[in-house]
Amino acid sequence: MLQETGHFAERIRSEDGRVDGTPPTGFHAAPLLHLKALDDRGLLETQRATVAAAWPDVLKKRADYDGVLNLFGQRWLDRRFRFAANGRLLLPWH
């Protein structure tokens, strides 16, 4: 859906595929790692810009789940952490 339309839906009906709703910002941050791995620079930058623009609002609302997804996606792109092939968390100071 993201590659086809450039955005997400909050809900997708399994019965007929209809979509509705505007998702929280975290929905845009969570796939940043995947978009980087796909080397889809255009979509990656679009999603990064969406996340960056919404970040002040996330902080004001204290939207914890959105905040965690935002930090996860953005900090991975900033190379603040990585995952080993076995799934182990790799931090730059280790």
Image: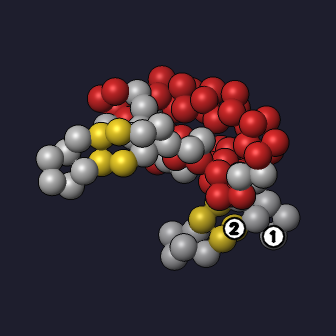
Q: Secondary structure at mark 1?
A: loop
Relative to residue 21, is residue 94 drawn left or right? Answer: right
Q: Is residue 59 visible?
A: yes
* Residue contact between numbered discs 2 and 1, judged by CB atoms under 8 Å: yes
Q: Secondary structure at mark 2?
A: strand
Q: Is residue 33 visible?
A: no
Badge number at residue 53: none
Residue 55's place in the image compared with 94, above or below, is above
Q: Amino acid under label 1?
A: His
Please report the residue visible at 23 percent of the width from the left and 41 percent of the height from the top. Answer: 18
Residue 56 location in percent, x, y? 79, 35
Residue 93's place in the image compared with 61, above or below, is below
The front one of 52 and 14 is 14
Q: How busy is the neighbourhood of tag 1: few (under 14 within 10 Å), some, or many (20 plus)?
A: few
Disc 2: which residue: 90
Please report the residue visible at 81 percent of the width from the left and 70 percent of the height from the top. Answer: 94
The N terminus sits in image quarter: top left
Residue 53 location in percent, x, y? 69, 28
Please report the residue visible at 47 percent of the width from the left and 37 percent of the height from the top. Answer: 22
Disc 1: which residue: 94
Relative to residue 94, is residue 72 drawn left or right? Answer: left
Q: Amino acid under label 2?
A: Leu
Residue 14 location in percent, x, y? 21, 55
